Amino acid sequence: MATANKTPPGADPKQLERTGTVREIGSQAVWSLSSCKPGFGVDQLRDDNLETYWQSDGSQPHLVNIQFRRKTTVKMLCIYADYKSDESYTPSKISVRVGNNFHNLQEIRQLEMVEPSGWIHIPLLDLNTPIRTFMIQIAVLANHQNGRDTHMRQIKVYTPVEESSIGKFPRCTTVDFMMYRTIR
Protein backbone atom coordinates (compact mmCIF):
# COMPACT_ATOMS: atom_id res chain seq x y z
CA MET A 1 0.00 0.00 0.00
CA ALA A 2 1.09 3.55 -0.72
CA THR A 3 1.88 5.81 2.19
CA ALA A 4 -0.29 8.92 1.99
CA ASN A 5 1.70 11.00 4.46
CA LYS A 6 4.50 11.75 1.95
CA THR A 7 2.16 13.09 -0.71
CA PRO A 8 1.16 16.74 -0.40
CA PRO A 9 -2.63 17.18 -0.19
CA GLY A 10 -4.32 17.68 -3.56
CA ALA A 11 -1.32 16.38 -5.51
CA ASP A 12 -2.16 12.65 -5.43
CA PRO A 13 -3.10 11.54 -8.97
CA LYS A 14 -5.66 9.09 -7.54
CA GLN A 15 -7.73 12.16 -6.63
CA LEU A 16 -7.80 13.08 -10.32
CA GLU A 17 -9.07 9.59 -11.16
CA ARG A 18 -11.88 9.95 -8.63
CA THR A 19 -13.17 13.02 -10.46
CA GLY A 20 -13.86 10.83 -13.49
CA THR A 21 -11.94 13.07 -15.91
CA VAL A 22 -8.85 10.83 -16.35
CA ARG A 23 -8.02 7.13 -16.21
CA GLU A 24 -4.65 5.45 -15.52
CA ILE A 25 -3.55 3.36 -18.54
CA GLY A 26 -0.04 2.27 -17.58
CA SER A 27 -1.17 -1.36 -17.30
CA GLN A 28 -2.02 -1.35 -21.04
CA ALA A 29 1.60 -0.57 -21.97
CA VAL A 30 4.81 -2.55 -22.22
CA TRP A 31 7.42 -0.99 -19.94
CA SER A 32 11.21 -1.25 -20.35
CA LEU A 33 14.20 0.41 -18.69
CA SER A 34 17.67 1.29 -19.96
CA SER A 35 19.13 -0.43 -16.88
CA CYS A 36 18.26 -1.44 -13.33
CA LYS A 37 19.78 -3.01 -10.25
CA PRO A 38 18.38 -6.48 -9.50
CA GLY A 39 15.12 -6.15 -7.54
CA PHE A 40 14.70 -2.46 -8.43
CA GLY A 41 13.01 -2.55 -11.84
CA VAL A 42 9.66 -2.04 -13.55
CA ASP A 43 7.75 -4.04 -10.91
CA GLN A 44 8.83 -1.58 -8.20
CA LEU A 45 8.15 1.42 -10.44
CA ARG A 46 4.53 0.29 -10.98
CA ASP A 47 3.59 -1.35 -7.64
CA ASP A 48 1.68 1.63 -6.10
CA ASN A 49 4.10 1.65 -3.16
CA LEU A 50 5.90 4.95 -2.52
CA GLU A 51 8.57 3.15 -0.47
CA THR A 52 9.87 1.10 -3.44
CA TYR A 53 11.68 2.50 -6.47
CA TRP A 54 13.43 1.83 -9.76
CA GLN A 55 17.20 2.25 -9.46
CA SER A 56 19.20 2.63 -12.65
CA ASP A 57 22.59 0.98 -13.06
CA GLY A 58 24.75 2.55 -15.73
CA SER A 59 25.58 5.78 -17.49
CA GLN A 60 23.16 8.62 -18.19
CA PRO A 61 20.74 9.24 -19.72
CA HIS A 62 18.58 6.72 -17.85
CA LEU A 63 15.50 5.77 -19.86
CA VAL A 64 11.97 4.59 -19.09
CA ASN A 65 10.18 3.38 -22.23
CA ILE A 66 6.38 3.05 -22.28
CA GLN A 67 5.04 1.39 -25.45
CA PHE A 68 1.38 0.94 -26.35
CA ARG A 69 0.03 -1.70 -28.73
CA ARG A 70 -2.13 0.89 -30.52
CA LYS A 71 -2.01 4.65 -30.87
CA THR A 72 -3.15 5.96 -27.50
CA THR A 73 -4.33 9.34 -26.26
CA VAL A 74 -2.21 10.50 -23.32
CA LYS A 75 -3.10 13.59 -21.31
CA MET A 76 -0.61 13.52 -18.44
CA LEU A 77 2.29 11.74 -16.76
CA CYS A 78 2.72 11.74 -12.99
CA ILE A 79 6.10 10.95 -11.47
CA TYR A 80 6.75 10.53 -7.76
CA ALA A 81 10.17 11.73 -6.58
CA ASP A 82 11.44 12.25 -3.02
CA TYR A 83 14.62 14.28 -2.59
CA LYS A 84 14.71 13.84 1.20
CA SER A 85 14.91 10.04 0.86
CA ASP A 86 16.94 9.74 -2.34
CA GLU A 87 19.26 12.81 -2.32
CA SER A 88 21.83 12.43 -5.17
CA TYR A 89 19.68 9.71 -6.78
CA THR A 90 16.84 12.22 -7.35
CA PRO A 91 16.42 13.41 -10.96
CA SER A 92 17.00 17.13 -11.52
CA LYS A 93 16.48 17.26 -15.31
CA ILE A 94 13.99 15.11 -17.23
CA SER A 95 13.11 14.95 -20.91
CA VAL A 96 9.76 13.52 -22.13
CA ARG A 97 9.74 12.21 -25.70
CA VAL A 98 6.91 10.75 -27.80
CA GLY A 99 6.72 8.98 -31.14
CA ASN A 100 5.77 5.83 -33.02
CA ASN A 101 8.94 3.89 -32.07
CA PHE A 102 12.52 4.33 -30.85
CA HIS A 103 13.64 5.79 -34.18
CA ASN A 104 11.34 8.82 -34.41
CA LEU A 105 11.00 10.07 -30.82
CA GLN A 106 10.66 13.83 -30.44
CA GLU A 107 11.11 15.77 -27.22
CA ILE A 108 7.93 17.55 -26.18
CA ARG A 109 8.80 18.57 -22.60
CA GLN A 110 11.95 19.17 -20.59
CA LEU A 111 11.70 19.77 -16.85
CA GLU A 112 14.12 21.12 -14.28
CA MET A 113 13.23 19.86 -10.80
CA VAL A 114 14.65 21.43 -7.65
CA GLU A 115 14.56 19.03 -4.68
CA PRO A 116 11.16 17.50 -5.61
CA SER A 117 9.09 15.87 -2.90
CA GLY A 118 5.82 14.33 -4.03
CA TRP A 119 3.95 13.92 -7.29
CA ILE A 120 5.13 15.87 -10.33
CA HIS A 121 2.33 16.36 -12.89
CA ILE A 122 3.54 16.63 -16.50
CA PRO A 123 0.78 17.59 -18.97
CA LEU A 124 1.29 16.14 -22.46
CA LEU A 125 -0.64 18.53 -24.65
CA ASP A 126 -0.34 19.66 -28.26
CA LEU A 127 -2.28 22.91 -28.80
CA ASN A 128 -4.36 22.14 -25.66
CA THR A 129 -5.34 18.67 -26.89
CA PRO A 130 -3.92 15.44 -25.44
CA ILE A 131 -1.18 13.74 -27.47
CA ARG A 132 -1.83 10.54 -29.44
CA THR A 133 1.21 8.27 -29.51
CA PHE A 134 2.50 4.71 -29.61
CA MET A 135 5.47 5.38 -27.32
CA ILE A 136 6.56 7.63 -24.48
CA GLN A 137 10.16 7.84 -23.31
CA ILE A 138 11.19 9.51 -20.06
CA ALA A 139 14.91 10.33 -20.03
CA VAL A 140 16.71 11.31 -16.82
CA LEU A 141 19.39 13.70 -18.07
CA ALA A 142 20.84 14.79 -14.71
CA ASN A 143 20.53 14.10 -10.99
CA HIS A 144 20.89 16.32 -7.95
CA GLN A 145 24.44 16.66 -6.57
CA ASN A 146 25.76 15.22 -9.87
CA GLY A 147 24.56 11.74 -8.89
CA ARG A 148 25.18 8.93 -11.36
CA ASP A 149 22.28 6.49 -10.86
CA THR A 150 18.68 7.53 -10.35
CA HIS A 151 15.65 6.58 -8.25
CA MET A 152 12.07 6.98 -9.45
CA ARG A 153 9.42 5.79 -7.04
CA GLN A 154 6.28 5.71 -9.23
CA ILE A 155 5.15 6.68 -12.74
CA LYS A 156 1.49 6.94 -13.77
CA VAL A 157 0.14 7.52 -17.30
CA TYR A 158 -3.29 9.14 -17.74
CA THR A 159 -5.76 9.37 -20.63
CA PRO A 160 -8.83 11.63 -20.67
CA VAL A 161 -12.20 9.96 -20.06
CA GLU A 162 -14.42 10.56 -23.07
CA GLU A 163 -17.98 11.78 -22.77
CA SER A 164 -20.76 9.24 -23.23
CA SER A 165 -22.15 9.06 -26.78
CA ILE A 166 -25.64 8.33 -25.38
CA GLY A 167 -25.93 11.67 -23.70
CA LYS A 168 -24.37 13.78 -21.02
CA PHE A 169 -24.88 12.33 -17.59
CA PRO A 170 -23.58 13.73 -14.34
CA ARG A 171 -20.29 12.19 -13.25
CA CYS A 172 -20.56 9.74 -10.38
CA THR A 173 -17.55 10.34 -8.19
CA THR A 174 -18.27 8.53 -4.92
CA VAL A 175 -16.85 5.06 -4.36
CA ASP A 176 -20.35 3.55 -4.17
CA PHE A 177 -21.31 4.96 -7.57
CA MET A 178 -17.95 4.11 -9.17
CA MET A 179 -18.55 0.42 -8.42
CA TYR A 180 -21.62 0.42 -10.68
CA ARG A 181 -20.54 2.81 -13.45
CA THR A 182 -20.09 0.09 -16.09
CA ILE A 183 -22.93 -1.93 -17.52
CA ARG A 184 -21.85 -5.53 -17.91
Image (tube, rainbow, N blue to C red):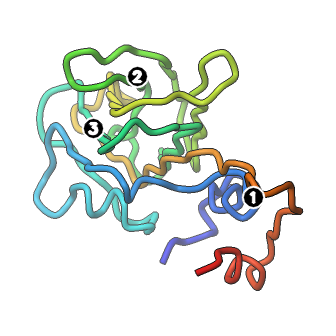
What number of labels is visible?
3
x, y percent for residue 112: 51, 22
Q: In this rendering, would 163 be left or right of 130?
A: right
x, y percent for residue 34: 16, 37
- In the rendered structure, find residue 65 and report the number of the disc placed on it: 3
x, y percent for residue 48: 45, 67
Report the quarter where the C terminus lies: bottom right
- Judge whether 77 appears above or below 141 on screen: below
- Residue position marked by numbered label 2 in the rendering: 95
Which element is circle 3 on?
strand
Tell me which amino acid carries mark 3: Asn
- Residue position marked by numbered label 1 in the rendering: 9
Please tell me how crowded label 2 is: few (under 14), some (14-19), or many (20+) other residues with Cα within 10 Å: some
The reply to whether residue 133 is in sight is: yes
Q: Residue at x 40, y 43 (%)?
A: 87
Q: In this rendering, would 34 be left or right of 45?
A: left
Q: In this rendering, would 76 be left or right of 107?
A: right
- Judge whether 184 appears above or below 112 on screen: below
Tell me which amino acid carries mark 2: Ser
Tell me which amino acid carries mark 1: Pro
